[in-house]
Amino acid sequence: MVEGRTPAAIRQATSEVFQQEGYRGFLGEMSLVFERPASAFDHLVYGDWDLHSLAHRVEVTIVPAGDGVYRLNCDAYRVRDAGDRVLSDTQRLGKLGRGPYQRLLDRVKRCLDAR
């Protein structure tokens, strides 16, 4: 939970943290989508021979939770053929695959608390 910050400040801090980790962001008012190419290991396990086709996508939503309090929701996906709108295959990551993204959200909170 984030208290005493505007959605714009939360959006800015979230964008900074994800960009530091190599993600490109697409920012909306209360939702943000970040994407970056998958690692070589991920290509070996989940991809195919095309090293540019697999990506990680993270959708972060800023949800009002009361008087000046917001919650960040995060959904993480593995996307095959990420550059192809017709053939892309999006697979939502289970709870075990979400740990790294929770750590990023924790960094967002720390960043906001430090300001």
Image (cartoon, helix red, strand yellow):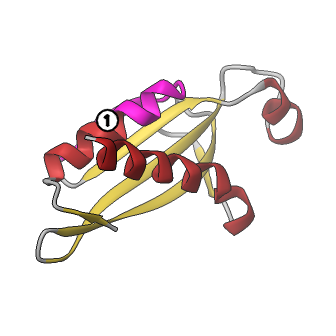
Question: Magenta part of the protein: which range?
Answer: 16-28
Please identify the quadrant where the N terminus is shown: bottom left
Please say whether residue 19 is one of the residues in the magenta stretch: yes
Quadrant of the image occupied by residue 102: bottom right
Task: Give the left or right position of residue 60, taking residue 22 as reference.
Answer: left
| Quarter of the figure with the C terminus | top left
Query: Where is mark 1, residue-wise?
Result: 26
Where is residue 30 drawn, in percent x and y?
Answer: 21, 55
34 vs 101, nearest the viewer: 101
Front residue of 17/115: it is 115
Q: Residue at x 31, y 39 (%)?
A: 13
- The total of numbered circles placed on residues is 1
Residue at screen point 46% across, 59% down: 74
Give amino acid for label 1: Phe
Looking at the image, which residue sits at the far bottom? 66
Q: Position of residue 36 (x, y in %)?
A: 55, 29
Q: Secondary structure at mark 1?
A: strand
List x then y, in percent, for residue 91.
64, 55
12 to the left or right of 72: left
Q: Is 59 on the left-hand or right-hand side of 46?
A: left
Q: What residue do we see at 56% from left, 34% from top?
A: 82
Residue 73 at x, y percent in the picture? 40, 64
Q: Is residue 89 above or below residue 42?
A: below
Question: Mark 1 Cα within 10 Å, few/some/many (few <14, many 20+)?
Answer: few
Q: Is residue 6 left or right of residue 58?
A: left
Query: In the orientation shown, which residue stands out farthest toward the front?
Result: 114
Q: Residue at x 66, y 20 (%)?
A: 52
Please say whether residue 1 is one of the residues in the magenta stretch. no
